[in-house]
Image (tube, rainbow, N blue to C red):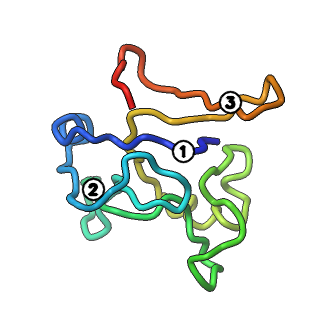
Amino acid sequence: MCVNYLAVQDARRYESAFGVQMPLGPWAWELYPKSRGTFIRRRPDVIDLEREATGGTWGLLPWFAKTPEIKFNTVNARCETVATTSSYKAPWARGQRCIVPMDAFFEPNWETDKHIRWKFRVRGDERRW
């Protein structure tokens, strides 16, 4: 249920971790739903499991959407319903998956009845944002 995330900025780290060249583009560092960023997917034009990095919009545009502006959030699919929810079931059945390279992501904590932004990252990664 990630609210937003920090994209990987270091091209060498990106390439060594994922085995693909980081695409060039005016990508944002801190991304929110419907932001443009990079992701890694299986190349659609080859039979092998070869990866490619490409740019895209964060979120799923369901097959039944008439325009890119949809009224509901398609950023988070739940494991309990991904195979049955109308937005996700067809892409899930076709094996449409991607990797979203990120240095950290944020989640809200509501323990105090206030939206407190918690940052999650790999242990030992102390870089400032």
Residue 64: x and y in percent read 65, 80
Figure label count: 3
* Residue 103 placement: quadrant: top left
- Which of the two residues, 66 or 7, is positioned nearer the viewer here? 7
User: Does 17 appear above or below 68?
Assistant: above
Q: CA distance from mark 2 to mark 3?
A: 33 Å
Q: In the rendered structure, which amino acid carries the disc numbered 2? A: Ala
Residue appearing at x 40%, y 64% in the figure: 56
Q: Secondary structure at mark 1?
A: strand
User: Does 110 appear above or below 25?
Assistant: above
Question: Answer yes or no: do the residues labelled 2 and 3 have beta carbons within 8 Å?
Answer: no
Q: Secondary structure at mark 2?
A: strand
* Residue 102 placement: quadrant: top left
Question: In the image, which disc is placed on residue 30?
Answer: none
Question: In the image, which disc is placed on residue 4?
Answer: 1
Residue appearing at x 60%, y 27% in the figure: 118
User: Does 38 appear above or below 71?
Assistant: above
User: Residue at label 3?
Assistant: 116
Q: In the rendered structure, which amino acid carries the disc numbered 1? A: Asn
| Residue most extreme to the top | 124
Label 3 neighbour load within 10 Å: few <14, some 14-19, many 20+: few
Q: Is residue 112 left or right of residue 118?
A: right
Q: Nearer the viewer, mark 3 or mark 1?
A: 3
Q: In the rendered structure, which amino acid carries the disc numbered 3? A: Ile
* Residue 59 placement: quadrant: bottom right
Question: In the image, which disc is placed on residue 53?
Answer: 2
Residue 84: x and y in percent read 73, 59
Label 2 neighbour load within 10 Å: few <14, some 14-19, many 20+: many
Residue appearing at x 67%, y 34% in the figure: 108
